[in-house]
Amino acid sequence: MLFKKITALSAIIIIQTVLAILMGGAFLSRASAGKILPGISAAGIYLGGMSPGEAEEILRDKYRDAGSGVLILEGWGRRWEIPMKDIGAVYDYRECVNNAYSVGRAGSLAKRVSELLGNKTENVSVPLPVRFDRDALQTLLAGIGGEYAKEPVNARLVLENKEIRVIPCEEGMEMDIQETMRRVTGLQAGMVFVVSIAAQSAIPRIRDGDIFGLTDVLGECVTLFDAASEGRAANIARAAGLIDGLLLEPGDTFSFNSAISPADHRGGFRKAPMIADGRMVEDYGGGVCQVATTLYGSVLLSGLEIVERHPHSRPVKYVPPGLDATVAEGLADFRFRNNLDRPVYIMSSGDADGGSVRVAVIGRKSGKAAYIITTESKTISPGMVIRSNPGLRAGESAVAAHGSPGFEVSVYRISVIEGTEGERELISHDFYPPEPRVIEIGISSGG
């Protein structure tokens, strides 16, 4: 019974206290009609008793222009200084004043009671926020992120003393743009405009475990070129580097054009001699077909599935007819599929000084199966064309074109198990038209 009386008395005291606070708050609100309540400040400036207009004016006078300042971003021992005007920085005076005026006036009963109680014991500080052009800020952070980032390093395979070993991967670091934006947009007047860049790990695309166990050379091909042609040598080295270290999971299809694109000055390629429409021309990427051809040879020996391959319009010097692969962005590609039940890894290098390009497909052999490549070729005579030349005297002749033979070639891939040939697969049947020998004879009797 005594407990019930104490509980009822406590409830009465609480109700009376709340009513007293509300009545006091109502009196305070009437006394401060149109004014910010006492005890409220913003950015270090006391605003109690001011009208919203007066408060905004004094804030503008104290904190004039956020755009005149400098934002400093720091990370990894580096710092970037960005003019605040470049990211549209402005102080939001109106929001600050509205928030200051609403203290003790807006919200739930409990919130107003809490704020009024607070006004009796301590000041309420309202922030003066800085607003930014978010698109400009995000674009700027993305640009700095490129400078700030430490690229991850993929795990890779190397061949040393006829043994394949794994070079471990390394995690990188990159800017967490969204978190860094949150830190920047949380700035307010009175703060030092220095923000630490938020970082996050950049995970390598190929980790150690992805290539662990790939210990066999499934197929390897080497071709030679004239290192004296600097543009061609540079292009071969560039293309070989771009396909080096690529990992194909079971079922993946590789596209040579996609791997080296863009094959022009934007991709670091130079102009060099190349075959186009049956004749030699000078254009960007001259030499990349030799890398595609060398890769084609190693893929054939690996037993992988050829999806797309095109021969040149005329034989090339670095491989026999039928074993070449031409590429041209948007026109012809070399593509193959990993039809094995395990990953394969491409190891590629171009020696611009020594004049060689080497490509190997690394994987894990299943049993003792291997492949050999054989060709069946028919040579087509170039023939001869005789035509008149008014510039030659009667009875004179000259060779205008030496001509070259054509070829009809079938390429087969044969599986070999323990020295015994097995399945014979037709890979391609190509035709390289002959170029006739052209003889010009004179018809002029002279003068």
Image (tube, rainbow, N blue to C red):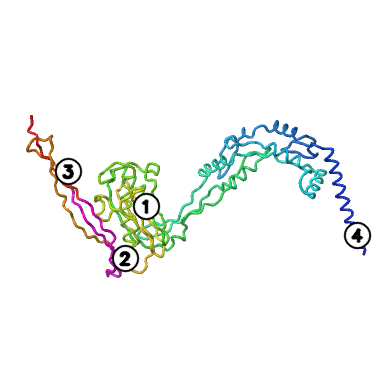
Q: Which residue is mark 3?
A: 401
> Hey, what amino acid is under mark 3?
Ala
Q: Nearer the viewer, residue 366 or 326?
A: 326
Question: Cβ–Cβ below 8 Å for labels 1 and 3?
Answer: no
- Per the picture, the main secondary structure of the magenta-coloured stretch is strand
Residue numbers of the magenta segment? 404-433
Q: In the image, which disc is placed on residue 6? A: 4
Q: In the image, which disc is placed on residue 370? A: 2
Q: Who comes first in sequence, dot 4 or dot 1?
A: 4
Residue 341 x, y percent position in the rendering: 41, 65
Q: Nearer the viewer, residue 141 or 108?
A: 108
Q: Residues within 10 Å of mark 1 (few under 14, many from 20)?
A: many
Residue 261 x, y percent position in the rendering: 39, 47
Q: Nearer the viewer, residue 298 or 347?
A: 298
* Separation (CA) of disc 4 from disc 3: 120 Å
Q: Who comes first in sequence, dot 4 or dot 2?
A: 4
Residue 201 x, y percent position in the rendering: 54, 52
* Separation (CA) of disc 4 from disc 2: 95 Å
* Separation (CA) of disc 1 from disc 2: 24 Å
* Separation (CA) of disc 4 from disc 1: 86 Å
Q: Element at badge 3?
A: strand
Q: Element at badge 2?
A: strand
Q: Element at badge 1?
A: helix
Classify the position of the N terminus by image quarter: bottom right
Q: In the image, which disc is placed on residue 256? A: 1
> Hey, what amino acid is under mark 1?
Phe
Please tell me whether residue 264 belongs to the stretch shown in magenta.
no
Left or right of 184 on screen, residue 56: right
